[in-house]
Amino acid sequence: MPENLGPNINSSSIEWVGYTPDNKYFYFARVSGFLTDLMISKWNDTTQQWGTSSLFDKHKLNMGNDIDGITMTQDKKKLYFSMYTFNNYPNHDESDIYVSYYDSTIGFYGTPMLLNINSHPDSSIPEYNPWNLGQDVYPTITGDGKYLFFGSNRNDTNYIHNKSPIFNIYESRLLINENGDTVTNINDYNKTLINKTFKLYQNYPNPFNPSTSISFYLYKSSMIKIIIYDNLGREVKELVNSFFLAGNHVIKWNGKDSFGNKLSSGVYYYSLFTDKERTVKKMIILK
């Protein structure tokens, strides 16, 4: 006989649920407007029911996007989850699996890292819908952290005929960390993470008039693009399309479009593309 989990959990807006490995905490997604909130509730031995739910991550993990399933290793040091990201500049929504490591200095999980098992097309392809191959969701990690199971429509072709996508269960054997490096503790992991991450920094000055500087860091030599978009997602300027050596770089932009016209005041976005990653930041022209 199914048992109701009580008023602190049940509502018409719950999408998915899960437990911590010790079964003391219950986490779930609650629809809040267009997005979902990641909630958690603790088991109360006295009342024999789940306690009042609260925001688990205070939006530190999902960064304003939706989370579709979450799981953690037995030691609670690794948190895996699927995140649906709304990348609308240009429109390229994705649903990917991330990992976040527990950081004892902040008492919470650190910045999410994108796993290399995701199936979506390259982020430079505009107007991509994750339902058309590449929605990786609802991960489950084994207690030892070596095997990850998740649902995906990566091999489905029904969308071509305007049918509902078909999902299958996939298994991935994870390395010690997602870069394939040997890691013995969290400090070693942080060192490898720093050296294996592309970074796009906030432009300076911001707001600006008439020019600004855009800085970025490449952990390896790469072919990159930097593209400027307006607030409607339209490309106004391809600022960079070239090969850069590993290290820090600064590019200056004079606030003009591809035809040399000065852009009007407003919100704009600049995006850094590499062969595997895409990062977007907002800037403001103020005249």
Image (cartoon, rainbow, N blue to C red):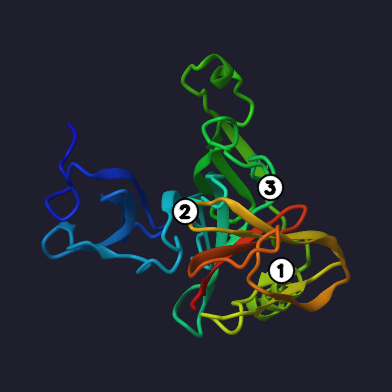
| Label of residue 71 in the image | 2
User: Is 267 on the left-hand or right-hand side of 119?
Assistant: left
Give percent across and percent down for residue 129.
53, 36
Q: Which mark is residue 141?
A: none
Question: Contact, CB < 8 Å: mark 3 with mark 1?
Answer: no
| Mark 2 burial class by Cα count in 10 Å: few <14, some 14-19, many 20+ | many
The residue sitting at 67% across, 77% down in the picture is 190
Of badges 3 and 2, the one in the foreground is: 3
> Within 10 Å of the Cα at label 3, are there few (<14), some (14-19), or many (20+) other Cα atoms?
some
Identify the residue at horizontal 20%, vertical 52% (top origin): 9
**Residue at image mark 3:** 124
Structural crowding at the residue carrying mark 1, measured as other residues with C-alpha within 10 Å and reported as few (<14), some (14–19) or many (≥20): some
In the rendered image, residue 40, in percent from the top left (x then y), is placed at 30, 61
Considering depth in this image, is 99 or 132 the residue closer to the camera? 132
Which three-letter amino acid code belongs to the residue tagged 3? Ser
Q: Which amino acid type corresponds to the residue marked 2 in the rendered image?
A: Thr
Find the distance from the CA under tag 3 to the CA under tag 1: 18 Å
Give the image location of residue 106, x and y in percent. 47, 82
Number of numbered discs overlaid on the protein picture: 3
Disc 3 secondary structure class: loop
Instruction: Indicate left or right for 89 with 40 as reference.
Output: right
138 in relation to 102, above or below = above
Which secondary structure, mark 1?
loop
Q: Earlier in the sequence, mark 1 or mark 2?
A: 2
Q: Which numbered dot is residue 197?
A: 1
- The N terminus lies in which quarter of the figure? top left
Q: Is residue 178 left or right of residue 13?
A: right
Q: Position of residue 242 (x, y in %)?
A: 85, 61
Cα gap from disc 1 to disc 2, whole angstroms: 24 Å
Given residues 278 and 236, the one toward you in this image is 236
